[in-house]
Image: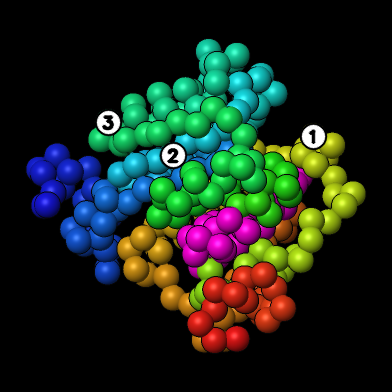
């Protein structure tokens, strides 16, 4: 397959990037990415994946749009209040890029459906708002050896990590169990631009991986990117992989 004239024009700024080219654009067109959560993080992530030309997006969220979502969840507008987020998201993303194929899942990710769903995609964007879903995505992606981006946000801060099972530390290498008593955005708020930064970072990491630009750390460490909105500073911390972690089973050597 080669790019049409329209595609050449649309994706010109992509293919000009060193190492991207028309071959990279074609690999994005063939890619399937699942976005779990269509809120503050999922909005920018899905927008940038669709804009970049990822061929198929799975869009998963069980919620409907509420007025309190609109200060950060930029996929949705005032007119969407009361509509399923999956429908609102599909409408905006296909308006942005009519070539995008979407598959919508207006349900929650559970231990019963996670593996069947995730196995059908090349990569996952974890954009949920709770540790239970984050760890479910981590454990399912590790067992299926699917790469995924994960992020969390609160107030003026956030962090993101991209995990390639068997090549980089997973979420449980960083945080073995879900911590208790962590405040939520419903308690301490969040500035909309913060998930904007972290969700964009998730999209960039997935795209880099789809293009073959992602490279593991020599020792298999994970990189956790922390954004401190108080000081407007991005700090990357190397987290070693744990040999007693559940992800150890998918490494070729331990
Ligand atoms: Zn691990």
Q: Is residue 51 visible?
A: no
Magenta residues, as a range?
138-164
Magenta stretch contains residue 162: yes
Label 2 residue near ligand 1, CB within 8 Å = no
Q: CA distance from mark 1 to mark 2?
A: 26 Å
Callout 2: helix, strand or loop? Answer: strand
Residue 159 higher or lower than 71, as above or below: below
Residue 248 image-quadrant placement: bottom right
Q: In the rendered image, which quarter contains the C terminus?
A: bottom right
Q: Dot 1: within a 10 Å radius of its alpha carbon, few (fewer than 14), some, or many (20 or more) residues?
A: few
- Gap between marks 1 and 3, in whole Å? 35 Å
Q: Position of residue 13 (x, y in %)?
A: 26, 53
Q: Is residue 97 left or right of residue 92?
A: left
Disc 1 target residue: 186
Q: Is mark 1 within 8 Å of ligand 1?
A: no
Q: Residues within 10 Å of mark 3 (few under 14, many from 20)?
A: few
Spatial separation of the CA atoms under disc 3 and disc 2: 15 Å
Q: Which residue is mark 2?
A: 58
**Discs 3/2, front:** 2
Residue 25: % across, % down: 24, 54
Residue at the spot of label 3: 98
Q: Nearer the viewer, mark 1 or mark 2?
A: 2
Q: Secondary structure at mark 3?
A: loop
> Considering only vertical position in the picture, is 96 above or below 34?
above
Whether label 1 touches label 3, CB < 8 Å = no
Q: Earlier in the sequence, mark 3 or mark 2?
A: 2
At 83% from the left and 56% from the top, the residue drawn is 179
Where residue 73 sits in the image (x, y, percent)?
59, 32
């Amino acid at each position: 397959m080669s790019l049409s004239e329209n595609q050449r024009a649309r994706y010109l700024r992509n293919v000009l990037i060193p190492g991207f080219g028309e071959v990279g654009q074609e690999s994005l067109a063939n890619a399937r990415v699942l976005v779990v959560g269509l809120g503050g993080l999922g909005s920018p992530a899905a927008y940038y994946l669709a804009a970049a030309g990822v061929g198929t997006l799975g869009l998963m969220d069980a919620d409907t749009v509420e007025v309190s979502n609109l200060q950060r969840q930029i996929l949705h507008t005032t007119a969407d209040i009361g509509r399923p987020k999956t429908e609102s998201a599909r409408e905006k993303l296909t308006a942005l890029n009519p070539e995008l194929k979407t598959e919508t899942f207006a349900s929650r990710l559970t231990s019963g459906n996670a593996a069947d769903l995730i196995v059908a995609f090349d990569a996952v964007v974890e954009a949920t708002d709770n540790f239970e879903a984050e760890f479910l995505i981590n454990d399912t992606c590790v067992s299926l050896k699917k790469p995924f981006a994960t992020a969390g946000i609160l107030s003026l801060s956030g962090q993101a990590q991209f995990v390639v099972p068997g090549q980089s530390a997973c979420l449980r290498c960083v945080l073995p169990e879900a911590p208790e008593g962590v405040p939520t955005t419903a308690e301490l708020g969040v500035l909309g631009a913060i998930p904007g930064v972290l969700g964009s970072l998730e999209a960039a990491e997935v795209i880099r991986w789809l293009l073959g630009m992602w490279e593991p750390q020599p020792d298999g460490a994970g990189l956790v990117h922390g954004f401190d909105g108080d000081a407007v500073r991005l700090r990357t911390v190397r987290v070693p992989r744990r040999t007693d972690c559940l992800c150890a089973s998918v490494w070729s050597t331990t």
